[in-house]
Image: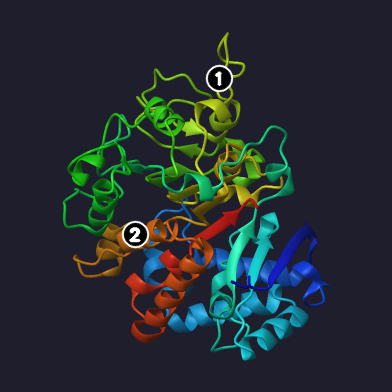
Amino acid sequence: MVSAPTAIVRMADAGDVYISWRWTHDVLSGGVGVVPEADVVEAIRGLAAALPNPSAPDSLEQTLTRGALSSYDAEAELAQLLSRTFLPYALAAQLHDLMTRGVRPHLRIQPSPRTAQVPWELIAPDPDVRLVEIADVSLLAPISVTQAPGRLTRPWASTKHLPVVAVLDPKVPGFRADSMLGSVLGRPDSAMPVAVRMATHAEAGRLRPAVSDPVAAFRRSDIDREWLGEALRAGAGRLLYVGHVTAAAPESGQSELAELHLACTDSTTGFAQATRSHRPLSARDLLLGTYTIESDPVVGQELWPMPSRVALIACESGGDGRFSEALGLVSALIRNGSELVTASRWSLPTDLAFTKLAGVASGARPLQEAICAIDAAHDDEDPVRSLGSWQREQLAVWRELRTPEVSPILWGAFATVLAN
């Protein structure tokens, strides 16, 4: 099997945005480009207006019903603006040439903090062409993360037979099902897409928690950091998390404050501040473990050794890319052993939100379908290409139906970060 041509694209903020690219093995010439600050500001402002803002009341309803990502024509205009701004002409010409020859390259992009939320897969080099249609796209983890001293890796080839650790909408202490940190998936039942998908893992003996009825894996109150650590240390090929993440504010400059919400009570030892009767698991916890807070500390890498592939299906779970010093959840997972992490660039609407705010039929399950697609891709030998294939399918339906449940508000949010 001949591997696809691969381009490494790096971006840097310095008022203007500087872009460089090179093709591995020098299959094509590399290049550099610069985007004037005024153009950067215009493009990022347009994107920000189209995305959910967790701190603004009614922002999700605005995004689902009136924002640029809710209208095909407006979304296409935004995609062209982002492409004109951030895709250098010489690189676009190379991609067009490869496309005409039937070659789909792999673009590995390392965004700058200001461009971290750009949905690269969606950008439109031509009004009728999206980047995901002519290239497979992934994000490149920072060298400071991949080359961190003592970092261990768990290769997929030698661990893919190990269990899938599934954290599925855990009950967060102190928060009702209909509250801010309440249920993401709603009341579980055996017919819902994610339960059907988990049944395949259970039948193969791969699902953790090991339950006979997959419904019993949802909305558990015992899935805390201790349980997670034990499950990971016992051996895991993959981790699937579906729940809540509280992203750190970019202006704080502290990406390590990002928090993962499990069933941990406020009596749990950790760096994050307790909220009501709950203490989140922060990126700082994953990195430091109990260092400085216990007399006999254990580093995070030993407490939570991450499997080769991790999916974080939660609001802005990939938010550490917006920081100049990436020490958030994705970075912590990679430092603790992961080779590949799929996370979200922005806040995700739930299936209930699609129904209540956008008028989508109650039987539609766009979030659950996305979870299943990502879970299936993570079992594939080429998860980046598999996820790209799913996004291409979603794009085709978006072009045809142009309805909220198939808009890129959901499927355009996901990005896969590769460590190697």
Image-based side of 108 in relation to 351, left or right: right
Local crowd at mark 2 within 10 Å, few (<14), some, or many (≥20)?
some
Q: Which residue is more in the foreground, 185 or 15? A: 185
Task: Determine the residue positioned at 72% across, 65% down.
Answer: 8
Query: In the image, is residue 321 above or below residue 226?
Result: below
Task: Determine the residue positioned at 49% across, 26% down.
Answer: 273
Q: Which residue is mark 2?
A: 372
Task: Determine the residue positioned at 19% across, 66% down.
Answer: 363
Q: Which residue is more in the foreground, 56 or 36? A: 36
| Sequence-first tag of 2 and 1 | 1
Res 110 → quadrant: bottom right
Image-based side of 289 in relation to 237, left or right: right
Dot in front, 2 or 1: 2
The coloring applied to the image is rainbow
Helix, strand or loop at label 1? It is loop
Res 234 → quadrant: top left
Task: Determine the residue positioned at 62% across, 82% down.
Answer: 103
Image-based side of 267 in relation to 94, left or right: left
Query: In the image, is residue 123 above or below residue 355?
Result: below
Q: Which mark is drawn over residue 290?
A: 1
Q: Which mark is drawn over residue 174?
A: none
Helix, strand or loop at label 2? It is helix
Residue type at tag 1? Thr
Expressed as whole percent of the image width and height from the top left, the position of residue 305 reads 52, 33
> Distance between the Cα atoms at labels 2 and 1?
34 Å
Residue type at tag 2? Cys
